[in-house]
Amino acid sequence: MKQKTKRIADYIKNQITYYTTTSMNQPHLIELILTFRCNQKCPHCDSQKIKGTKELTINQWKDIVKKINRWLGPKPICLAGGEPLLKKGVYDLVSSISKNNKVYIMTNGQHDEKTAKRLVESNISQILISFYSLNPRIHDSIRGTKEAHKRAKNFIEELLKEKKKQKKDIRIDLSFLLTSKNFREAPAFIKHFSKKEIYTSLTPLRRNPLDIFSEDFKFYNKYWYKKSSLWINDKEEFVKIIKKIICMKKKGYLINNYINTLKKFVDYFENPSQLNKFNCYMPLLNFVIGPMGDVRLCYYSRNIGNVIKKDPKGIWYSEERMNEIKRLKKCTNYCRIHNNYNFINLDEKIRFLFE
């Protein structure tokens, strides 16, 4: 009952904040981008183009999380990148901050059994792995790296072994990027991993503009999708696949996406700009901290402060944040499709609030 009441209260505060630009809410998720470094060469991502970025130390990250906890209490914290497992001392960081918070990590899975063992030992709550196909050739082509499928597959298997061996209640999710190369196999992919008690999060192809942390959009082209070989143009076949996935969702297969969000994927690949009529709530919910401590509200937000120079609470309630929320209300970028909550229908919203 207490959790339901909190959900309803948070929902009301978010709505008031959005429509009045009065800061009544608190961040839902804290995202720490530990590094831009990555060991993959995905054609849809720009992280490998960012060179020479200085990074906060592990001790600095620990201090930042302590400040956040003094302000908000325990909070879900997501470790991201680049590839966060490339950050030296990351296991120490997870062990430290997981004492008071649920810690999630997003990884490409390009790691060995030692990494799997240490990650499970670190008291992580959830691991989200980018895995794009049951077919090695397809996965490797999307990743831009040879044997990426083999390494990710082995990493998933090692995590499952260590999870069982150490008797840890860790949730493992897979992020399946929907592209022209793999969308037809999505139902088989979901079925395969549901049997292993692994959830699938379906993610439509998008450009990953991490260069916004360097204060410009020099790598980003809003109409990149028109020239992308990964863009899904076979709309008729895609509709059939989405309908099949929705049926699987209703039958209980482990799919994270809401049904109405899945339906909106069709509109997105038909013309991404038509989704701009929907409100985007991500700037109200996120507190994204980059490798150097700069804070943004989403991946298209401007810098609103630095946690090394200013207290996190002060940044959240600052005039800079409220001005940025006003600006982002007019944002016409297409990433709103990646926020499940933006597109849930009334029935799903009621279940979200009251279940």
Image (spheres, helix red, strand yellow):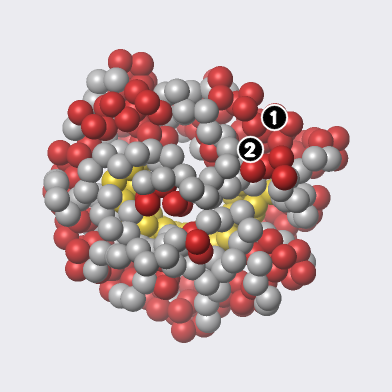
The residue located at (23%, 32%) in the rendering is 320
Residue 39 versus residue 22: which sits nearer the camera?
39
Tell me the crowding category of disc 1: few under 14, some 14 to 19, or many 20 or more residues within 10 angstroms, Cα based: few
Query: Is 197 situated above or below 165?
Result: above
Instruction: Work out whether residue 344 can be spotted.
Output: no
Residue 144, image x, y percentages: 66, 67
Q: On the rendered image, what quadrant is the N terminus found in?
A: top left
Query: Is 234 situated above or below 66?
Result: above
Labels 1 & 2 near each other (Cβ < 8 A): no
Nearer the camera: disc 1 or disc 2: 2
- Provide the secondary structure element on which disc 1 rests: loop
Q: Identify the amino acid type marked 2.
A: Tyr
Residue 209 versus residue 87: which sits nearer the camera?
209
What label does residue 223 carry, if any?
Answer: 2
Q: Name the residue under label 1.
A: 271
The residue located at (40%, 78%) in the rendering is 118
Residue 202 versus residue 311: which sits nearer the camera?
311
Residue 176, image x, y percentages: 64, 54
Residue 107, image x, y percentages: 50, 64
Q: Distance between the residues labelled 1 and 2?
A: 11 Å
The residue located at (44%, 51%) in the rendering is 211
| Residue 217 horizontal side relative to residue 11, left or right | right
- Provide the secondary structure element on which disc 2 rests: loop
